[in-house]
Amino acid sequence: MKKLFSLKNISIGIGLIITDLAVYVFLGLMLMSYDDFYDESKGAYFSLESMTFWQKINYISLNLWHLINLIFIGFLVYKIVKYSIKNVKFRTI
């Protein structure tokens, strides 16, 4: 039977979390230029028409990263529930 919390799995999980946070920091810092150089005459705040090409790329990338994280969290919950149900021994009366 495979262990869920082996040293290998824990180190992979920590590595994924650090990578995820690094991507969030990178995309967040790249999007900070929009706040610094926002001009009201170009359109509403955070509308795509008021952004340059690279700001649009950063904005869309951040939203895609949110979606990827939601899918990964759903997959992780599914695997944990599947593992828990498989290894629980039900008692009969």
Image (spheres, rainbow, N blue to C red):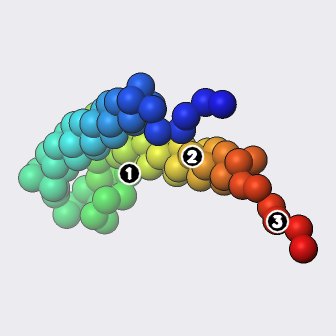
Q: Residues within 10 Å of mark 2 (few under 14, many from 20)?
A: few
- The quarter of the rendered structure image containing the N terminus is top right
Q: Amino acid at mark 1?
A: Leu
Indicate the position of residue 27 as horizontal and vertical percent values: 26, 40
Q: Is residue 58 toward the left or the right of residue 36 in the image?
A: right
Residue sitting at x 17%, y 43%: 29
Q: Are marks 2 and 1 in contact (CB under 8 Å)?
A: no
- The residue singled out by tag 1 in the image is 48
Q: Residue furthest bottom?
A: 93
Residue sitting at x 27%, y 36%: 18
Mark identifier at residue 91: 3
> Which numbered disc flags the more N-terminal residue, 1 or 3?
1
Q: Is residue 17 toward the left or the right of residue 35 in the image?
A: right
Q: Amino acid at mark 3?
A: Arg
Mark identifier at residue 58: none
Q: Nearer the viewer, mark 2 or mark 1?
A: 2
> Which numbered disc flags the more N-terminal residue, 2 or 1?
1
Q: Based on the displayed image, in which of its 4 quarters is residue 35 positioned? A: bottom left
Mark identifier at residue 76: 2
Mark 2 to mark 1 CA distance (whole Å)? 33 Å
Q: Nearer the viewer, mark 1 or mark 3?
A: 3
Residue sitting at x 38%, y 51%: 48
Q: Nearer the viewer, mark 2 or mark 3?
A: 3
Q: Residues within 10 Å of mark 3 (few under 14, many from 20)?
A: few
Indicate the position of residue 22 as horizontal and vertical percent values: 24, 36
Q: Is residue 3 toward the left or the right of residue 48 in the image?
A: right
Q: Callout 1: helix, strand or loop?
A: helix
Q: Callout 2: helix, strand or loop?
A: helix
Q: Residue furthest front?
A: 93
Q: Nearer the viewer, residue 31 or 70?
A: 70
Q: Amino acid at mark 2?
A: Leu
